[in-house]
Image: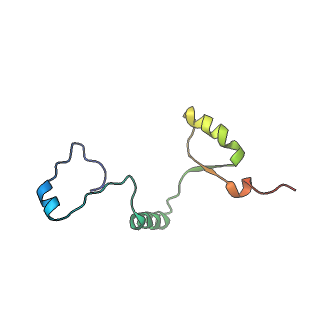
Amino acid sequence: MVGLPDKTLELPLIPLIKGRKIIAGSMIGGIKETQEMMEFAAEHNVKPDIEVIPIDYVNKAMERLHKADVKYRFVIDIGNSLKPSF
């Protein structure tokens, strides 16, 4: 099942117990599903909308999140943020 049902799910418990079945849930897919999604995105040129920010902008970004003033996902540019300045 993908997604959440619109009403409570009723399950026959005796066949589950006798058949040693397991029911599990997850908010995200596993490795296989993630790989399929990444391949689909690459094949169809689907890219995320992001705003790359330096690490010293994180507090401002948090303020913007609190104000709902964020259009895209923030991505912190750690590599360029932590370069030594000589």
Residue 67 to residue 38: above or below = above
Q: Quadrant of residue 21?
A: bottom left
Q: Nearer the viewer, residue 49 or 10?
A: 10
The residue at the point 57 percent across, 37 percent down is 65
Residue beneath the point at 16% across and 48% down: 10
As drawn, the residue found furthest toward the right would be 86
What's the coloring here? rainbow
23 on left or right of 15: right
Pick the quarter of the image with the C terminus: bottom right
Tag count: 0
Near-viewer residue (67 or 17): 17
* Quarter of the image with the N terminus in it: bottom left
Instruction: Please state the horizontal and vertical placement of residue 79, each as a whole percent of the image.
Output: 70, 58
Work out whether 18 lies above or below 13.
below
Q: Residue at x 29, y 57 (%)?
A: 24
Rendering quarter of residue 77: bottom right
Quadrant of the rendered image containing residue 36: bottom left
Query: Whole-percent x and y of residue 22?
Result: 24, 60
Q: Position of residue 6 (x, y in %)?
A: 24, 43
Q: Work out whether residue 49 or residue 26 is closer to the camera in this orientation and state it.
A: 26
